[in-house]
Image (tube, rainbow, N blue to C red):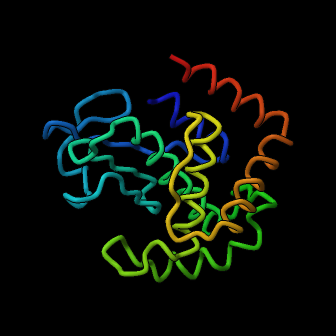
Amino acid sequence: MNDYVSFLCTLLNIKIPKVYFKANDKVYDLKHKPVKKELFQVKDTSICTSYPKENVICVNQDVCKDRSLVYIYLAHEIRHLYQYACVYNKNQKVFSIDERSIPIWKKELENYADSSSKHYENQEIEKDANLFANFIAIVIFKRVLDVKEVDQKEYEFKTKLFMNFFASNPVKKKLIQKQISKMKV
């Protein structure tokens, strides 16, 4: 899991976050070292939550029926960390495909509607994170996700955009190929 998180962060050029997992009422970090339960903050009904200001992600494996999906949830949350870095970190490299999204991300991060809100999935930051997670699911896990609240044209456009962007960069392409070979069982 540590290598996978590192791969995603390297792909997006962001700092590796602290990631806390809860399983069987125990909390541990990426290196499987126990941590204080107070560090783990996520709703009992949520599987995964990111805290971009703190650069932290919490994963509640106790409510995740399909543990293989944790990899997809992590891709989604790590994309949120990238979005936050693009908006608030002056040194963050913003990919050309995301430049137009920055003002929208900033507005939504400042007025964030969490998963308890009715139109949570309609936010651009959520759609973008879902589409990035889908891109990772397709490329790394050979799995297509059901991305909610995204029309077919937007889905196809953004998926192709991610594919073309990351495939056209030799360093990113090699990084992805290396991760694919690591994930093969």
- Rendered location of residue 161, percent (x, y): 77, 56
Q: Residue at x 63, y 26 (%)?
A: 180
Q: Is residue 128 above or below residue 142?
A: below
Q: Residue at x 52, y 67 (%)?
A: 126
Q: Is residue 117 above or below residue 46?
A: below
Q: Residue at x 20, y 43 (%)?
A: 62
Q: Residue furthest left?
A: 25
- Rendered location of residue 164, percent (x, y): 82, 48
Rendered image quadrant of residue 103: bottom right
Relative horizontal placement of residue 38, taking residue 121 as reference (left or right):
left
Relative horizontal placement of residue 156, taking residue 88 as reference (left or right):
right
Q: Is residue 54 above or below residue 122?
A: above
Rendered image quadrant of residue 83: bottom right
Q: Residue furthest top?
A: 185
User: Of 16 and 174, which appears nearest the observer?
Assistant: 174
- Rendered location of residue 160, percent (x, y): 76, 53
Q: Residue at x 26, y 57 (%)?
A: 42
